[in-house]
Amino acid sequence: MPPPEDTPLPTRGERIKAIREARDEDQERFAAAFNALAHQMGLRGVKYDTTKLSRTETNGRPLKLDEAVVIAELDPRRRGLEWLAVGEWAHAMRGKEPSAPRTKRRA
């Protein structure tokens, strides 16, 4: 269930930081784990350092899809790529059809 409307939702950067903290790692160790997994997954040219990670956690740079895939895999809680991309409501909306936009009928 989504949080109440007056509760600010965590940003994507805050969700990345939550994953890093759930792993009990500082930025340097998380970047090393990211780089090792990216290499294992065969993702060439996808590397993180503490500067890039800090800017991503503070929403100072966009998150690329291949980076999101690696970070979602590093999440010990296995919340998934959807959660990382859009947050908690992704789980609440799973299995529901999106509603069609309403249009006004002319008389």
Image (tube, rainbow, N blue to C red):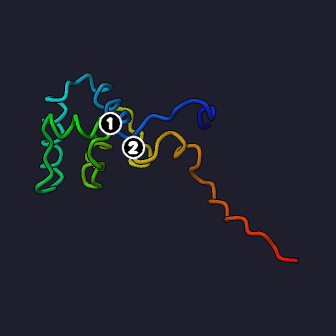
Q: Are marks 1 and 2 in contact (CB under 8 Å)?
A: yes
User: Residue at 30% of width from left, 25% of height from top?
Assistant: 21
**Quarter the N terminus occupies:** top right
Which of pointers 1 and 2 lies earlier in the amino acid sequence? 1
Residue 39 placement (x, y as % from top left): 12, 49
In the image, what residue type sits under mark 2? Answer: Leu
Element under label 2? helix
User: Residue at 28% of width from left, 30% of height from top?
Assistant: 20
Left or right: 5, with 77 as reference point: right
Q: How many marks?
A: 2
Please give the label number shown on residue 16.
1
User: Residue at 47% of width from left, 41% of height from top?
Assistant: 87
Q: Quadrant of residue 95?
A: bottom right
Residue 80 placement (x, y as % from top left): 40, 44
Q: Which residue is mark 2?
A: 84
**Quarter the C terminus occupies:** bottom right
